Image (spheres, grey):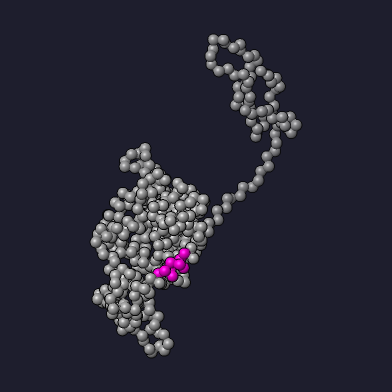
């Protein structure tokens, strides 16, 4: 160990040397004790070194004194609207609820104070936010059904009194899912309304419930969900049938249609409503290859006419692996699973089980959304003083005659002469005898040929 033999420098009024704080170095290092197991200091450094500039500049350096100025008061901070709203006990919740989804995500990520306050009231804020922006979807797509979209409580509140386990609460991923599904459902109904097929207000909730059924990959779970009258009411089943009628009218439209009536069944047998939304909005244009892929993946080979269309049973032609044939109608969406009925057929079967007799309302489903709109549109046609009123709704006997005429036209029963409704009834001048089986069969064959050519 090196020993410093230089004399200590003169002290000044403003300098403190290491000798004031450190013990002086010893002249000799004691011999280590072999029996001592304690730590030994091999080298020691003083935490302060000798002032080498004191011998040159002198021990005393004159202190330059400056006049003391009184401290100026801090300038007042400008009023911050955002911080004031953030720290208000009531307006903070209203601010969070009314922020758009991208804005609240951005603030939660970049603002520490906003992040802490939202975590403190996360459960109430998330629920109120979802109810404000998606009142129907947030109730149907409950966060309890989607545990993968939940997070642990940010404030570590216990679950069921167990302090070591934080409870699960909904997160922003669940809110994003709810908003996205509401956009899809309203997009489907809005596109139908734009093209002239309007539906009642309750169809939005029915479609959300149907989406929940589409996500279930077991027949037993679907059946239990549909048979619960508190979830699926009779009005929901009628609304779903009305939606099916409007969707078939849309796809079979000679101008705007992009398929045939059975096309709606194929799109509603998928795992979500996004394929239907993409087709209606034009984001996906179905050609022959895409349609073949959709049909092969949806229906089992036993349900398809492979004798007329053998390419549906050929893996090389349809470009679909054999293990994925009919995957949408198999239990658990497993290639080795048993048959699982389509959720569309299960809703229809539930209506039959409840004896709702929905077939009696099919004509009203077709006429829905046109009577009031036509009355408003024709009221001011031409001269404003001329008012054209719509005919009265059909009576029960008239509805029965129209149903018999339609069934006779398409060959379900033998048409009776004079069973149709004339012009004075507000339907048309064509009678039941004029729409015989021969004419109906010719039109049907022409429609089938046109469908085959378009496919």
Residue 289 image position (x, y, % from top left): 51, 57
**What type of secondary structure mainly makes up the magenta span?**
helix
Look at the image and give the residue range highlighted in magenta.
444-452
Residue 390 image position (x, y, % from top left): 33, 81
View extreme (right): residue: 56
Q: Give the residue at x 47% y 72%.
A: 255
Q: Is residue 417 above or below residue 450?
A: below
Find out whether residue 403 is within the magenta segment. Answer: no
Q: Nearer the viewer, residue 17 or 384?
A: 384
Q: Give the residue at x 35% y 55%.
A: 343
Q: Nearer the viewer, residue 192 or 299?
A: 299
Residue 313 image position (x, y, % from top left): 46, 52
In this rendering, would 98 be left or right of 422?
Answer: right
Residue 229 image position (x, y, % from top left): 26, 57
Q: Give the residue at x 37% y 60%.
A: 207
Can see residue 52? yes
Locate the N terminus and report the quarter of the image it occupies. top right
Q: Give the residue at x 33% y 69%.
A: 411
């Amino acid at each position: 160990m090196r020993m410093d033999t230089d004399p200590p420098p003169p002290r000044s009024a403003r300098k403190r040397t290491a000798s004031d704080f450190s013990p002086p170095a010893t002249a000799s290092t004691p011999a280590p004790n072999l029996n001592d197991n304690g730590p030994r200091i091999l080298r020691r450094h003083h935490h302060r070194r000798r002032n080498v500039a004191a011998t040159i500049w002198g021990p005393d350096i004159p202190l330059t004194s400056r006049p003391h100025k009184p401290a100026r008061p801090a300038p007042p901070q400008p009023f911050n609207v955002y911080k004031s709203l953030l720290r208000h006990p009531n307006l903070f919740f209203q601010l969070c609820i009314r922020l758009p989804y991208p804005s609240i995500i951005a603030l939660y990520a970049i603002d520490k104070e906003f992040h802490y306050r939202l975590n403190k009231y996360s459960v109430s804020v998330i629920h109120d936010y979802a109810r404000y922006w998606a009142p129907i979807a947030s109730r149907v797509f409950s966060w309890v059904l989607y545990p993968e979209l939940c997070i642990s409580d940010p404030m570590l509140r216990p679950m069921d009194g167990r302090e070591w386990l934080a409870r699960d609460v909904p997160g922003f991923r669940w809110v994003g899912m709810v908003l996205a599904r509401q956009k899809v459902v309203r997009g489907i109904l809005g596109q139908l309304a734009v093209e002239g097929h309007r539906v009642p207000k309750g169809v939005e909730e029915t479609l959300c419930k149907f989406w929940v059924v589409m996500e279930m990959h077991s027949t037993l779970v679907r059946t239990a969900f549909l048979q619960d009258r508190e979830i699926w009411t009779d009005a929901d089943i009628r609304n779903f049938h009305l939606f099916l009628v409007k969707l078939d009218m849309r796809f079979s439209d000679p101008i705007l249609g992009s398929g045939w009536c059975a096309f709606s069944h194929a799109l509603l047998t998928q795992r979500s409503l996004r394929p239907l939304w993409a087709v209606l909005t034009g984001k996906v244009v179905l050609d022959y290859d895409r349609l073949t892929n959709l049909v092969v993946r949806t229906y089992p080979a036993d349900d398809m006419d492979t004798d007329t269309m053998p390419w549906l049973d050929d893996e090389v032609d349809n470009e679909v692996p054999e293990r994925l044939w009919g995957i949408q109608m198999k239990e658990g969406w497993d290639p080795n699973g048993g048959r699982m009925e389509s959720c569309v057929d299960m809703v229809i079967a539930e209506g039959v089980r409840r004896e709702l007799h929905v077939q009696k309302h099919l004509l009203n489903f077709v006429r829905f959304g046109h009577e009031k709109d036509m009355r408003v549109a024709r009221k001011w046609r031409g001269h404003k003083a001329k008012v054209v009123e719509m005919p009265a709704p059909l009576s029960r006997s008239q509805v029965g005659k129209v149903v018999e005429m339609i069934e006779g036209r398409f060959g379900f029963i033998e048409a009776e002469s004079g069973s149709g409704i004339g012009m004075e009834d507000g339907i048309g001048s064509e009678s039941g005898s004029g729409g015989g089986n021969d004419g109906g069969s010719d039109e049907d064959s022409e429609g089938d040929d046109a469908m085959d050519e378009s496919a």
